[in-house]
Amino acid sequence: MADDEDKLVTKPFKFVTGFDARFPNQNQTKHCWQNYVDYHKCILAKSEDFAPCRQFYLAYRSLCPSAWCERWDDQRDKGNFPVDLE
């Protein structure tokens, strides 16, 4: 019995977004995009320490492929991101 307990492995927590009526379809691309934009607008308006901004962060990190986020971050850094976040 003690051997079984030694074999237990703790898996990392995976954030799962709940249902959002604005995005009822299986394709969650728009949901990903909206959460990314909302997060960056939120931290500009309130700062990264503002707790509700974390919800947007967790949602976009869960929904969006990392390559998309990297590309959007590069676009924001270069000033050619398609949405005015300010």
Image: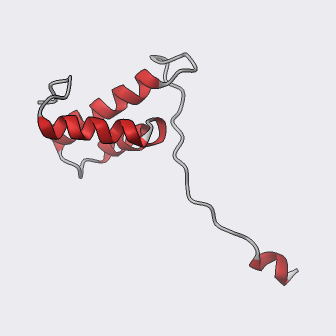
Relative to 9, residue 72 above or below: above
**Residue 26: image location, x then y, percent:** 58, 20
Relative to 76, residue 31 above or below: above
**Residue 12 lies in what quarter of the image?**
bottom right
Is 29 on the left-hand or right-hand side of 48? right
For the point 21% across and 42% down, the residue is 43
Is 55 on the left-hand or right-hand side of 1? left
Is 35 on the left-hand or right-hand side of 74? right
Relative to 21, residue 18 above or below: below
**Residue 22: image location, x then y, percent:** 45, 16
The C terminus appears in which quarter of the rendering?
top left
**Residue 9: image location, x then y, percent:** 68, 69
For the point 19% across and 28% down, the residue is 81
Farthest bottom residue? 2
For the point 25% across and 40% down, the residue is 73
Question: Toward the viewer: 51 or 4?
Answer: 4
